Image (cartoon, rainbow, N blue to C red):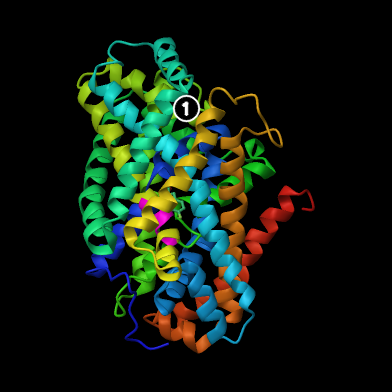
Amino acid sequence: MTDTKKSIHGEWSSRFAFILAATGSAVGLGNIWKFPYITGENGGGAFVIVYLLCVLLIGIPIMMAETMLGRRSRQNPINTMITLADEAGADKNWHYLGWMGVIAGFLILSYYSVIAGWASAYVLKAFTGSFFGADAVAIKGLFDGFMASPVQLIFWHTLFMLATMLVVVRGVNTGLEKAVRFLMPCLFVLLMLLVAYAMTFDDYYDKGIKFLFTPDFSKLTANGVLTAMGHAFFTLSLGMGAIMIYGSYLPKNVSIAKTVYLIAGTDTAVALLAGIAIFPIVFAAGLEPAAGPGLIFQTLPIAFGNMTGGWLFGILFFVMLVFAALSSSISLIEPAVAWLIENKDMSRQQACIWSGSITWLLGLGTVFSFNVWSEFKIFDRTIFQLLDYLTANLMLPIGGFCIAVFAGWIMKQQHTEHELDMPDALSYKVWRFLICYVSPAAVFLVFLHVVGVL
Ligand code: PFF
């Protein structure tokens, strides 16, 4: 592998562009929609601690490994695994890891786009004043009514998928990079505004903050631990090749380690800030933190409908959510698009149309889980719940486990050392210890815990 090798799709114009794009991928519905509701469902503080530990011990080392694999091969995840396995003299079957990633991307995006569609619809609802003066019952009625309408959900899902395709079709520099340059700074400003608003509540500390940060381990189940670990993968976009493909567009001279700390740190901060902004509002309105996927849609509009400036805050919040989702969704589909271009000789446009249409179609399963098929369950789960469990709790951790094993045990040490180019020998040793032992063992132990062996 030569140091001059470049991706045929282009390259990020700078380290900053990569940071924006990867942070854009990491920060999304996972931080603002999912983190609060799964924290609420799993009892708060103890869940947050397990999640933070997973980010630190599993997420960060694997993110470095994934970026490194992409940059070394400069191809889509499937071809990356073929090339690097070949280079290490390992079995060809490693390319199935790339395949699992591409499939996970499709499955995740299929429901991600539906939820992002909800957020888009709520921009309009906020704008037209639907929350104005509404109480909890009215807001729940609004949400339930929306969920009951497959036509509306499909409309917004379609719109969001089209927006995603429109960005992806423009390619690495003109599409992805331009979009995140604009999206990310907006997101931060809006989130800070919301936190400032939440701090004006009387119980801000006693209820909201304590719920998030006071651990009560009796509330944490084995499945809660799995969800926390799965979420560490989901929120950092790990285990499916999204960060790998972004790494393949990373210029050679950029330090992977420093960049990854920054991305993971920002992602974690956004999730915690979202929690700090959301839970005080939930408790102040006497609402249930365990309300499920509807949590932010059923709770925040009450606040927006009744506070001064709520009209504007409401619009801003949902716009922010759509932006965050868009900069993530483009990374969910990019591995498949890059594969179609590299291997099937398609133009970027054709690749986008193909992958976008398949994802859109799959998304209908999630749309119907909230209405006409809500009683249809597989393993006691609706299609949406099944897709979420299968991808976040199983496929991403399994993908991450394999990436750790590959980077730690299969690749030649001199290659990983050269590619990571750590500032000092000790940092490399720490990474190596984590990737060879700690990260894979932690994933394995959590799985054992869930199946009841531990
Ligand atoms: N990290 C994104 C979020 O937190 O919303 C979701 C995601 C994006 C997961 C890309 C996986 C991925 F590859």
Residue highlighted by disc 1: 294
Seen at 51% across and 80% down, the residue is 83
Q: Position of residue 206 (x, y in %)?
A: 43, 28
Q: Secondary structure at mark 1?
A: helix
- Horizontally, residue 259 falls left or right of residue 180, namely right
Q: Is residue 127 above or below residue 221?
A: above
Q: Position of residue 176 (x, y in %)?
A: 28, 57
Q: Is residue 290 above or below residue 107?
A: above
Q: Is residue 297 above or below residue 61?
A: above
Q: Position of residue 290 (x, y in %)?
A: 54, 28
- Horizontally, residue 32 falls left or right of residue 213, namely left
Judging depth in this view, the residue of 203 and 139 nearest the camera is: 139
Q: Quadrant of the N terminus?
A: bottom left
Seen at 45% across and 41% down, the residue is 360
Judging depth in this view, the residue of 151 and 275 nearest the camera is: 151
Q: Position of residue 192 (x, y in %)?
A: 26, 40
Residue 155 included in the magenta stretch of the image = no
State the extent of the magenta-drawn residues as a range: 330-335
Residue 332 included in the magenta stretch of the image = yes
Residue 412 visible: no
